[in-house]
Amino acid sequence: MFYRFIFRAFFQKLDPEFAHELVVAGLKAARILGLLRAPKPKHSYPVMGLNFENLLGMAAGFDKNGQLIRELHALGFGHVEIGTVTPRAQPGNPKPRLFRLPKNRALINRMGFNNEGADVVAERIRTLRNSGVPLPVIGINIGKNKDTSAQDAASDYELAANKLAPLADYLVINVSSPNTAGLRDLQQVDALRPILTAVLKVSGSTPVLLKIAPDLATSDIEAVTALVNELNLAGMVATNTTISRANLIAESNTGELGGLSGPMLQERALEVLDLIRAALAKDKTVISVGGVFTRSDLQQRIDRGADLVQGYTGFVYGGPAWAKSLTR
C-alpha cells in the first residue's frame, strides 16, 4: 500500500525513464548502506544444470547493463536476465521511449537496445563474479546492433556470445523485440538458423535459449520450436512484448508505438506456452514471461509446463516487495 501511494504521488508524475534512473540509484545506495542484503537460500531448483533459489526471475530490459544484479537478488529474484546487450554500445531510440499506462497497469517501450556494449558489460560481470559475493543465476540476453544489416546479423550475435557466454549462467538470443527495425524478421527459420548456429559455435557449455514474440502465428511458433529441437538449444523464452493493442482501456499513451507489456499479455503468453511445451523436447527449458503479476499467475505458468517464470511490469507496479510476495 505504501509503495502504491508513493508511486501515484511521486513516481507517476516523473518521466518513466528518469524515474527508472532514480530507482537504479536508490537501489544501489540501499545496498551500499546495508539495507539490501543477499537472501539466505532456502530452496534449490535445478534447471539447465543450474541451481535457482526460486522460480521467479527479472526479465531482460530492466537491468540492461548488469548494474543491479546484487540489488535485484536481495529483493527476492532467483535469477536476473540482463540486457539486451549488443556487440557495440548504442544509444537506442530517441526519447521519449518509455510510457506508463496506469489504468491498464501496463508499459509501452521503444527503447531500441540502448546499452553500454558487450565489452563494458563483460568487464562488469567479470568483476562481480571475482568479488565472491552471493549472486543469483545470471542470464545475458544478446542482440544485434541497429546499424548491422539482417544479412550480417549472425556475426553480431556470434561476437556478443563469444564475449559474454563465458560469464553467463545462460544466454538468450533476442530476435523478437519490436523496437529494432527488421529484427522480428529474423524469427523466420531461414534467417534464424545461421544465427543460432553461430552462437552455438562459440557458447561452449553455456545453455543457449531463444526468445520469441507473442505475435507469431501458430505455424511460425511450431517451426521455430522444431528448429530449437533440431539444433539442440537449451530451450526457449516466451514471450517478448506485443505490438497488439487488444483489450486496452483507452488512456493518453495507448497510441504510442512500441512493445506493450502488462496483464493483457497473460492470455497470449499462456497460449504460446502451451504451443511450445507441446512441441518442445521434454528435456528443454521453457521460461514463461508476460502478464505475471500475482503468485497465482506464477503458479499457473508452472502448472502449464514452464520451468521458470519472469516478470518486469509486475515489479514496476508492485514495488520492491513484489518478488518476495510471489515466492515466499
Image (spheres, rainbow, N blue to C red):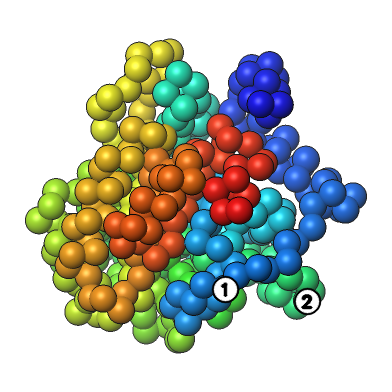
Residue 237 to residue 323: above or below? below
Q: Which residue is mark 2?
A: 132
The reply, left or right, for residue 47 in relation to residue 118 is left
Amino acid type at circle 1 is Ser
Res. 255 image quadrant: top left
Q: Position of residue 51 (x, y in %)?
A: 55, 76
Residue 226 to residue 316: above or below? below
The reply, left or right, for residue 1 in relation to residue 243 is right
Label 1 sits on a secondary structure element that is loop
Residue at the image point whose x is 47% and y is 40% from the top: 293
Res. 158 image quadrant: bottom left
Earlier residue among tags 1 and 2:
1
The reply, left or right, for residue 253 in relation to residue 69 is left
Hey, which residue is sitting farthest right in the picture?
A: 33
Q: Residues within 10 Å of mark 2 (few under 14, many from 20)?
A: few
Q: Position of residue 141 (x, y in %)?
A: 47, 61
Q: Position of residue 302 (x, y in %)?
A: 38, 58
Res. 135 image quadrant: bottom right
Q: Which residue is mark 1?
A: 44
Hey, which residue is sitting farthest left in the picture?
A: 219
